[in-house]
Image (tube, rainbow, N blue to C red):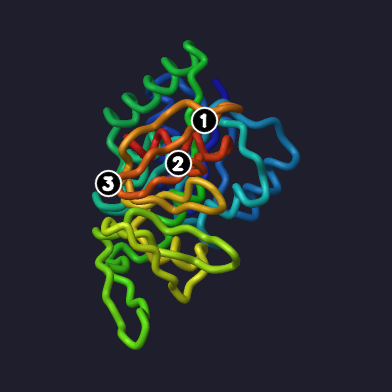
């Protein structure tokens, strides 16, 4: 098994390497920054497994993924608290909470080896994880939207919203009262303001509330069609490139 460690604190990297040695696993390489890691991946075959710290000396390790299509399994190491760790569970990614425990490391490595034997590969929705972890842990997501109806302003609570969708260059809220209301945001801007555990962008057109899903049906070209409560439309389709991440999000 070829393993590398990406960790900016060299004593922590050496300690992790010793813990792997106790499991009869040799550390092939230790890297300590985003820049060094990108350069290494450009010039070397990808390892079987990466133990990857989130916060490196020159930035977040997600920047590596922006430059390199990583072909390795990953166990993240992190000092983030329990709320942020929901991101990893949501995306079925192994993680180790610092300070790393030897028994937990063994469990994570054993899981990787079992998956390798059965040729089971993790599905990494890096953008989803990045969104959850890069934001401050105390970030409060939007609880309501204000819309103009005639001469009146109306507040729409987030729990009343079935989905957001774009149409004719406008962005709309569809509510559980079967109303369509125009808002002054793009769908991309709305996505940034919402709790990603509750809302998911299934395609370019739709951003849906998990609580609004009534049924999920197999559709052509390995896609999925959704039926929502209080919204009757036939084009609520999970795009093919989003299907794997969508299934993980549901769990």
From the image, which quarter does the N terminus lie in? Answer: top right
Q: Which mark is residue 211?
A: 3
Q: Residues within 10 Å of mark 1 (few under 14, many from 20)?
A: many
Q: Pick whichever, 213 or 107, lies toward us.
A: 213
Q: How far apart are the two marked residues, 2 and 1, measured between alpha carbons? A: 20 Å
Q: What SS does tag 2 mark?
A: helix
Location of mark 1 (residue): 73
Q: Is residue 197 visible?
A: no
Circle 1 sits in a helix, a strand or a loop, which is it?
strand
Measured as percent of width and height from the top left, residue 122 is found at: 48, 29
Which label number is shown at residue 14? 2
* Lateral position of residue 160 relative to residue 223, left or right: left
Give the residue at x 48% y 43%. Answer: 236
Q: Residue at x 48, y 32 (%)?
A: 224
**Label 2 crowd bin: few (<14), some (14–19), many (20+), radius 10 Å:** some
The picture places residue 74, in percent across and down from the top left corner, at: 48, 35
Which one is closest to the eye, mark 3 or mark 2?
Answer: 3
Q: Residue at x 72, y 35 (%)?
A: 44
- Pinpoint residue 243: horizontal percent, then vertical percent: 50, 35
Q: Secondary structure at mark 3?
A: helix
Q: Is residue 130 above or below residue 105?
A: below
Q: Nearer the viewer, mark 3 or mark 1?
A: 3
Could you say which disc has been placed on residue 171 in the image?
none
Query: Please, is residue 192 above or below residue 43 in the view?
Result: below
């Amino acid at each position: 098994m070829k393993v590398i460690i990406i960790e900016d604190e060299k004593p922590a990297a050496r300690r992790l390497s010793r813990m792997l040695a106790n499991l009869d696993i040799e550390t092939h390489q230790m890297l300590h920054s985003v820049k060094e890691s990108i350069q290494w991946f450009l010039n070397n075959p990808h390892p079987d497994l990466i133990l990857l710290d989130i916060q490196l000396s020159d930035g977040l390790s997600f920047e590596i993924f922006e430059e390199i299509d990583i072909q390795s399994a990953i166990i993240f190491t992190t000092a983030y608290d329990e709320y942020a760790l929901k991101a990893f569970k949501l995306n079925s990614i192994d993680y180790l909470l610092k300070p790393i425990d030897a028994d937990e490391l063994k469990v994570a490595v054993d899981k990787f080896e079992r998956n390798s034997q059965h040729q089971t590969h993790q599905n990494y929705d890096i953008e989803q994880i990045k969104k959850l972890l890069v934001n401050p842990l105390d970030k409060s997501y939007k609880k309501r939207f204000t819309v103009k109806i005639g001469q009146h302003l109306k507040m729409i609570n987030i729990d009343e919203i079935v989905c957001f969708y774009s149409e004719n260059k406008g962005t709309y809220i569809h509510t559980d009262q079967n109303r369509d209301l125009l808002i002054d945001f793009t769908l991309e801007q709305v996505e940034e303001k919402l709790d990603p555990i509750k809302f998911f962008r299934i395609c370019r057109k739709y951003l849906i509330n998990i609580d609004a899903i009534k049924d999920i049906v197999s559709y052509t070209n390995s896609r999925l069609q959704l039926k929502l409560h209080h919204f009757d439309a036939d084009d609520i389709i999970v795009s093919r490139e989003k299907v794997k991440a969508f299934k993980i999000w549901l769990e």
